[in-house]
Amino acid sequence: MTRDWIATARTLSEALPYLQRYTGAIVVIKFGGHAMGDDAAMEGFARDIVLMRQVGVNPVIVHGGGPLINDTLARLGIRSDFVRGKRVTDQTTIEVVEMVLSGRINKRIAQAINDQGGKAVGLSGKDAGLMQCVRDAPELGFVGQPGAINTEVLERLFDAGMIPVVAPLGAGATGETLNVNGDTAAGAIAAALQADRLLLLTDVAGVMDADGDVITEIEPEQLRALTRDGIVAGGMIPKTETALAAIEGGVRAVVILDGRAPNACLLELFTEHGAGSLIRAPRRGTG
């Protein structure tokens, strides 16, 4: 037992430079996948977020909700069609999407954080003009792409010690509700905040090479080459596209990591080993 406590103390001591490194940093976290549907995983995630805030990090949670939206639409007998992997969203569907994202999912995450002693505030991209959107392809209906991001509401929440939990919905040109891909929304918000890190939690360990091994650190051009060669494919492509766009927008680094792993966010931020695949632009020489 004494050895366990000694190991814990050593771990805390070794984390000191990383705790100092991230004091005051903004970290945007896209939360989704298996962890969001599991009560124990949700509790662990919430505890990690509260700890991050306690040591001076400013976290922003952006969540998805596709599986629960699918289940709710099915129960209501509303059919979903998809074009190029995106849900066709008519007026009836967007009402259900808003109900699920801004209601059930958003408040569940905020409550989980509050239960761990944090101060989470649930909102959507429609609140306080946070995320103004433009319509995506006309055939998709009420689906949007982030345009202008108003970071003032998030910055005020940081100043008040609050943790924003954002549902990926935005307002269109006439105030209509638009559904936004969760990864895309997280990337746009991270870029607007000039975040230190964007963490994309998913159900795989990270970006894999041709042998199926996780690539722990990769530069944008290498990532583009893996995509051209078909090594990065399927559901990983939207995440890597989000990562590349975020870095081009000024985010210092993006990490794609397994949200099912216990304490994944803490491992990434506060240990030498890190977690998942870190993507960032090449470091410039000092001359």
Image (cartoon, rainbow, N blue to C red):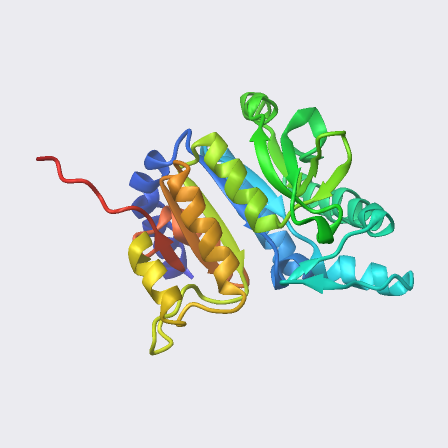
x and y percentages locating residue 120 in the rendered image = 65, 35
Q: Nearer the viewer, residue 154 or 246?
A: 246
Q: Nearer the viewer, residue 120 or 186?
A: 186
What residue do we see at 61% from left, 24% from top?
153
What residue do we see at 33% from left, 34% from top?
20
Does 28 appear above or below 92? above
Q: Quadrant of residue 65?
A: bottom right
Q: Residue furthest right?
A: 76
Number of labels in the image equals 0
Q: Quadrant of the N terminus?
A: bottom left
Q: Quadrant of residue 210?
A: bottom left
Q: Nearer the viewer, residue 115 or 138?
A: 138
What residue do we see at 29% from left, 46% from top?
281
Quick check: can you spot residue 11? Answer: yes
Does 154 appear above or below 32? above
Does 86 appear above or below 109? below
x and y percentages locating residue 204 in the rendered image = 50, 67
Q: Quadrant of residue 155?
A: top right
Classify residue 229 as left or right of residue 260: left
Q: Residue furthest left?
A: 287
Q: Residue furthest bottom?
A: 211
Classify residue 241 as left or right of residue 181: left
Q: Quadrant of the C terminus?
A: top left
Does 117 appear above or below 4? above
x and y percentages locating residue 213 in the rendered image = 35, 73
x and y percentages locating residue 103 in the rendered image = 79, 43
Quick check: can you spot residue 215? Answer: no
Classify residue 89 as left or right of residue 249: right
What residue do we see at 85% from left, 65% from top?
74
